[in-house]
Amino acid sequence: MPIDVHEGSQTFHLHNDVLSYVFAVREGYPLSLYFGARVPDEPEFDYLVDEEYRPSSVGVSPEREYLSLEHVRCEVPFSGAGDMRLPALEVVTAAGGRVLDLTYRGHELSCGKPALRGLPATYVEDPSEAQTLVITLADDVAGVTVRALYTVFSGRGALVRSMEVENSGQATITLERAMSGCFSLEEDGFEMIQLTGSWARECSVARSALHPGIQGVYSARGHSGHQSNPFLALVRPETTELSGEAYGFSLVYSGNHALTVDVDPYHSARVLAGVNPATFSWPLAPGEKFQTPEVVAAYSDEGIGGMSRTLHTLFRSRLARGPWRDRPRPILINNWEATYFDFDEERIVEVARVAASLGVELFVLDDGWFTGRDDDRGGLGDWEVNEAKLPGGLAGLARRINELGMDFGLWVEPEMVNPGTRVWEEHPEWVLHAPGQPLRPCRHQYVLDLSNPEVVDYLYGRLERVLGSADVAYVKWDMNRSLADVYSQSTPPELQGRVWHAYALGLYDLYDRVTRRFPDVLFESCCGGGGRFDAGMLAFAPQAWTSDNTDAVERLRIQWGTSLAYPVSSMGSHVSASPNHQLFRETPLKTRADVAYFGTFGYELDATRLTQGEREQVRAQVAFMKEHRALIQLGDQYRLRSPFEGDGNECAWMVVSAEKDEAIVAYYRILQQINVGRRALRLAGLDPDARYEVREEGAPAAPGVMGLRYRRPLTGSELMRVGLDLTDESAGKLSSGRGDFLSRVFTLRRAGA
Ligand code: DGJ
């Protein structure tokens, strides 16, 4: 069983093949004792309870002054009782204070994993896949009862936590802080990795040593944000991609988050993850409950890559839902960078016709298909087809696309409204807007109040009508501004503190209803690119548009960073035109495809402008992706050479099949260098004893020549220890060949397989 409970010592040991998580109840308080690599179970781990008296600290009672909550590591730290760090739970009680005393009352064990009310969450398909422990804590004076949930999965280095807080008293209380989970590490000798950035520069990897005090990531924008992904990792200083300890924390939430690491003066590190308390204040009437989102904690002693692969397989197979979960994704063409708003039906069909002739499977009609939308100043909110542009309506266009042998997909941005639309005129009270305050625009648009169920109903009705009006196989659900003026005109003043989180719940409700109504449609989330690339969204949309930046060189960093937490199958990645529309950089078509392969793959350019030679190249790329997408999107990813390290001039990654029979390796070199000598790339994840035939995609096929210099299959151990030879025989002796923005893709196949 993955959870052992030792009643005598009140010790709980959650474990599987990879990890152990141990806590024990002492003096009524559940105290964290250990989280890390698997250790054998024992009836008690009492030596880990730190009861050393330290002067100048607050004891829990006159009789037990020796015990201070400041010096132990509470599983559910709470406010007002002598633990001076940031708590997981802070409550304004009916008496008006914030003093709590939550003590252990009991526990329950069950097989499987319960769903979370109103929130996306990981799940199991069979109860044997996981076990769940619920511990109950209560404070009878304050009238607070907490149920802390822990689920540990069999065979995965992951456990998941969440909390349900109930007002078990007689008067209203207010939650000012209700985090999803607290993870305590006994020491602070870690480095923190976070994914930072901005629009078009998402998921830059930043790694720095922990320092005393609070550090972490947060959002106060109403979506998870380009700036600060709801993920962080703690790794040892010596941890690399392939070795060493790594803890990853990923919040399954798309609203305002906070993930903090609090290093105290005694060198312990407390990780808290949950809804950002800065924009949260949740009154609870007697009997009411509040459910937090869940946080996933992954542990690996196989490096940052091991942590990522744990998150990837969990998110891909037990967070994403629906028929697209396990399917390789269709190769699409999106018209945004081809036409922007300037199109009509004939123009769309022209682009689609060329794409179809090259093997592309799905045409996505992006922004601009509805009334009032000839630029980004108007149109959002009513969702009526612009028949001047599309005389046959969506149904007519979809039919013409289908006749070309392609599926039809559509862009929407349901959460937003522009002035001048019917909904804006008829329902000003549906817009987030604080009384008497100015209304602040962003991209000329305003935010509909999804905390109001009437608005959610309206949007559901519009989406149902639009998506039901044509044969729509795919939806890109965009969201192009951060929230401000967050005041719900349908909510009484004393409940306004709920609105930020209630917006996220309204969004989830809408997504849930729409995805259930159209279960076969493939959904891709988007937020001006990667502004809402989070685990919460993946529960509804198994893929997300990774960035509005489609430049192949920039994409290396963006896709590398995003892959720290999220699987290849979730990363929307397209080949766009050269010069690139964001950076005006010119890169080879091959390089653009070699980068985009490591995602969902598609095109975002005017296919009619491709030369004959380029068309042949695209045809070959599409064929390559069709042949290999199952491996690329569902295989195990190993990152090999980081564009964030060294001079940042190189990047490499690979995917390996579960049976280790096949692999695809990609190597990218941004600027050409001279006189650099022999170059080799050490691979990973292969069977050391197997022999692999190595071929380079697009390399001249000479009889008996597999890689550029290989005359025989290579063992996995050679490829992993000696490395894949990158010497390029087509280059002159001094130069490392083939110019700037070089990319090379190698396929490996077990010899004889
Ligand atoms: C932002 C998205 O990220 C783009 O891909 C495109 O869909 C535009 N919005 C359309 O307005």
Image (spheres, rainbow, N blue to C red):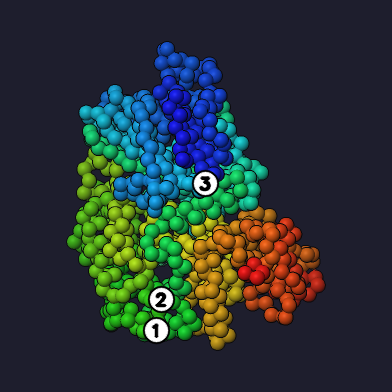
Residue at which label 3 appears: 157
Image quadrant assignment for residue 677: bottom right
Q: Secondary structure at mark 1?
A: loop
Mark 2 vs ligand 1: CB under 8 Å? no
**Disc sitting over residue 404 in the figure:** 1
Q: Quadrant of ligand 1?
A: bottom left
Q: Where does label 2 land, which residue? A: 363
Q: From the viewer's perspective, is residue 149 above or below residue 457? A: above
Residue extending furthest top? 63
- N-terminal of the two: label 1 or label 3? 3
Q: Position of residue 748 (x, y in %)?
A: 64, 68
Indicate the amino acid at tag 1: Leu
Disc nearest the viewer among 2 and 3: 3
Q: Say what amino acid the circle numbered 3 marks.
A: Gly
Give the Cα distance between marks 2 and 1.
10 Å
Quarter assignment of residue 638: bottom right
Seen at 23% across and 56% down, the residue is 455
Q: Secondary structure at mark 2?
A: strand
Q: Is residue 504 left or right of residue 58?
A: left
Question: Where in the figure is residue 146, as x and y percent of width and height?
Answer: 34, 33
How many other residues sit within 10 Å of disc 1, few (<14), some (14-19) or many (≥20)? some
Q: Position of residue 726 (x, y in %)?
A: 72, 67
Q: Residues within 10 Å of mark 3 (few under 14, many from 20)?
A: many
Q: Is residue 199 left or right of residue 497?
A: right
Residue 728 visible? The answer is no
